[in-house]
Amino acid sequence: MKSLTTALCALLGQSTIVLGQGYTNESEVPLYGLSPPSTHLGSGGSSARWTDAYARAQAIVAQATLEEKLNLTRGFAGQCVGNTGSIARLGVPALCFSDAPDGIRGNEFVSAFPAGIHVAATWDRDLMYDYGRALGDEYRGKGINVALGPVAGPLGRVVRGGRNWEGLSNDPYLAGAGMGNVVRGMQDAGVMANPKHWLLNEQEWRRNPGSLGESLSSNVDDRTLHELYVFPFMDGLKEGAVSVMCSYQRVNNSYGCQNSKMLNGILKTELGFEGFVLSDWGAQHSGVASANAGLDIVMPDAGYWGQNLTNAVNNGSVSTERATDMATRILAAWYYTKQDNGSFPSPGVYSNLQKHEPIDVQANHGALIREIGAAGTVLVKNVNNALPLKKPTFVYVVGYDAQVPASPWQNPSRYGGGYEVNFGWETLKGTLVTGGGSGSSAPAYVVSPFDAIRDRVVKDRGILRWDFESINPTPYVNADACLVFINAYASESFDRTSLTDEFSDRLVKNTAANCTNTIVVIHSTGIRTVDAWIDHPNVTAVLYAGLPGQESGHSIVDVLWGDVAPSGKLPFTIAKQESDYGHLLNGTVTFDAFPQQDFTEGLYIDYRAFDRDGDEPLYAFGHGLSYTTFEYKDLAVMSEEKTDTRPIPDPAVPVVQGGHPALWDVVAHVTCTVSNTGGVAAAEVAQLYVGIPSNDEFVTPVRQLRGFEKVRVEPGKMSTVTFPLTRRDLSVWDVKAQQWRLQAGSYKIAVGASSRDIKLEGSLEIAA
Ligand SMILES: *[C@@H]1O[C@H](CO)[C@@H](O)[C@H](O)[C@H]1NC(C)=O
Ligand SMILES: *[C@@H]1O[C@H](CO)[C@@H](O)[C@H](O)[C@H]1NC(C)=O
Ligand SMILES: *[C@@H]1O[C@H](CO)[C@@H](O)[C@H](O)[C@H]1NC(C)=O
Ligand SMILES: *[C@@H]1O[C@H](CO)[C@@H](O)[C@H](O)[C@H]1NC(C)=O
Ligand SMILES: *[C@@H]1O[C@H](CO)[C@@H](O)[C@H](O)[C@H]1NC(C)=O
Ligand SMILES: *[C@@H]1O[C@H](CO)[C@@H](O)[C@H](O)[C@H]1NC(C)=O
Ligand SMILES: *[C@@H]1O[C@H](CO)[C@@H](O)[C@H](O)[C@H]1NC(C)=O
Ligand SMILES: *[C@@H]1O[C@H](CO)[C@@H](O)[C@H](O)[C@H]1NC(C)=O
Ligand SMILES: *[C@@H]1O[C@H](CO)[C@@H](O)[C@H](O)[C@H]1NC(C)=O
């Protein structure tokens, strides 16, 4: 098998193709995944800022020897999670890379921010930006050049996927809004963002090669690739992301970090990416092939490069232009983010075994974390206004998730060392503020739900009882409310085996059996089904409280007592039962040597699948209750006369980073009004869903999110919301034309409070 592979690659001079499961004959090997071997050299043409960055980078690179250029493309051991080489002679420092997307991992005096999925649940573009900015300020304060995030891969195709919580929702539009705003925030702080993982790393099982064989190959058709998986990355690129991380698993049987079509083809040519591609740690599986396919930096060490890459350039296997391109892209990213200006700190990343002065970068980020924590909390059930709690009150707090564990070392990090503690505590160990693995943050402190509830009850002169351990808590017949805290853990490196756990379900049922006002708070890494008890008449309120970060307790108390009216909306669909997710519930579990994961469902994941099948979810994508009521009125749909609405963008216009510039032209506007018809000030997320005309050639989902706006409205007041619709928002990916294409016909326009709670309907006509 191996020799056949090698022969094939030598023949084609392209990325490695590994023969897939069932392929025993060379002529049967699927050749998709290949693209022309010519590499795409960066040009800096995207904007004046890129042009300037390229000019400066080129001036330095022109003075560098081959060894010096290639020194920037590889990892060295150092104080950071990743460190490139330097060119001391030319004043180019080693670059420092660090996890995680929700806080600097394994460090002291840093903040633990809410995880990506929680930020998505806010549906608040301003908070997404503020989040990126605050994270960026912390990274910069520690002298870290590249922050390894944000995440839109995994997108969340597989419901039980282990890393979905690091990402920004399984809807590409919502994830794109998150990507774009977080990237802009981080880079405004002067830190390089690193959108990851490019692409299709949708499950943990066999993401890497190992004793069973090669890694999983994600096989997806070109249209789905663009409309679902590439889509959110486009927003990050448009906002200037200077680096992208390639993924562990294979795509069409070619490894993510040596897949020429994915790197040179889609990322660098079609989307005009000007920055550098960084390998995930240990994701490089070839030397010449990965260099020619578009990889620019290998981590954490020299991998297949180092002296071998120098030799490969000297013998012509890799061109000198390509070597120069790698170094130019890396330095252009450095100039683009202005890290050359002399004020960028030297890395201050220490393990706790080293004695050193503390570098405190927390600023007042706790207040922002508390705000996002509350804003991303989703109220899905609230019978007879069980919430907000009244005061004074007798509160009974139940469940392992209400408090911090007896010792943070109950679940020591799998990544070891330093101040790192894996605060993605496993279920039953303590309150969950983040998930596990390299996306886990390192809180300076954790305010547990119980701590914050106690402080609140003390203030109001109430009564408090608690039971963190028993599955059958002692009933307190006089309690006004029984708050049950449960969670659902997930981690990098394995997928979830269930969306529920029996202990938590029994705990809720036992509490409810003796408490007429049982309020359940779920800290969850993602979808957590609740069919075991959701219909119990004593379960009066349910909150999905996500992964809120270090201010967890304050955030939930703000919502429980109504200091903040809930405004979070589900960034995924909660099904009535796990089996309703069908084949997307589990990842592909196989022991084959060449495992294949075929994305046969195409565009139909999450609500797109429920809508197609007419299945009723328990809580729809976009659902979330408030303490007030809203009325939607006055829908208006206006097309922009001045915009070019020819089906395909003008091919004569050059691509800039993010794709063809016309994709971002606003083709139409939708507006409506949202009135607060209840008694308290609150924010509402108005959502726009578009039904793109469906025909034989382009069958389209019933509706797709293509706009949202969060507005805060005082009681009795009204706010106008505007949804700009870009060409991309209204297009399908045309595989034949290899371009985004507008469809002639009538677009269905639906505005509502969730994907299933449509308040206003209209249409938009695009002429043939
Ligand atoms: C491989 O497949 C081709 C086409 O199906 C066939 O002509 C050829 O004989 C096969 N080769 C082997 C070695 O089986
Ligand atoms: C993967 O293969 C499918 C099926 O041939 C093709 O549509 C798609 O473009 C390929 N994608 C890549 C990245 O090679
Ligand atoms: C490569 O980088 C390393 C680490 O920063 C440094 O020690 C070494 O001198 C560099 N080599 C060259 C050729 O500049
Ligand atoms: C270079 O290639 C040799 C021979 O293929 C291999 O043993 C070595 O690990 C490679 N890597 C480096 C960094 O030299
Ligand atoms: C060129 O050098 C690389 C790295 O040492 C090696 O893998 C490759 O086989 C060489 N190619 C030729 C044609 O010598
Ligand atoms: C360098 O960047 C920092 C942070 O953006 C800024 O405050 C400072 O003015 C800049 N210095 C120079 C010399 O441009
Ligand atoms: C999903 O995976 C679990 C193990 O993780 C297995 O028990 C179950 O049968 C699988 N379900 C389906 C529908 O494949
Ligand atoms: C309800 O409370 C009674 C005592 O009042 C207790 O015997 C019973 O076990 C409780 N039920 C559950 C399901 O916990
Ligand atoms: C609800 O709680 C009350 C009060 O403890 C209890 O009597 C009743 O049986 C509970 N209802 C159910 C369905 O368990």
Image (spheres, helix red, strand yellow):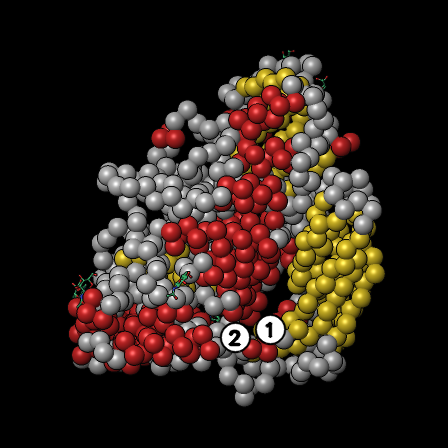
> Which image quarter is the N terminus in?
bottom left
- Separation of marks 1 and 2 at Cα, in angstroms: 9 Å
Asked if marks 1 and 2 touch (Cβ < 8 Å), the reply is yes
Pointer 2: residues within 10 angstroms few (<14), some, or many (20+)? many
Relative to the observer, which residue lies in front, 697 or 499? 499
Q: Residue 175 appears at what percent x and percent y?
A: 56, 58
Residue drawn at x 72%, y 26% is 390
- Please give left or right for residue 135 compared with residue 691 in the image: left
Q: Say which residue label 2 marks.
A: 659
The quadrant in which residue 662 appears is bottom right
Whether 568 is drawn above or below 500: the answer is below
Residue at image mark 1? 664
- The tag on residue 11 is none
Instruction: Measuring from the top left, give residue 127's x and y in whole percent.
Output: 58, 52
> Could you tell me if residue 533 is visible in this image?
no
Q: Earlier in the sequence, mark 1 or mark 2?
A: 2
- 367 with respect to 698 (left or right): left
* Three-letter residue code for mark 2: Gly
* Vertical arrangement, residue 658 with respect to residue 380, above or below: below
- Rendering coords of residue 635 (x, y %): 81, 62
Q: Can residue 360 be seen by looking at this rendering?
A: yes
In front here: 45 or 296?
45
The residue located at (49%, 36%) in the rendering is 432
Instruction: Say which quadrant the C terminus sits in.
Output: bottom right
Q: Tag 2, which secondary structure? A: loop
Residue 467's place in the image compared with 672, above or below, is above
- Quarter of the render that holds ligand 4: bottom left
Q: Amino acid at mark 1?
A: Trp
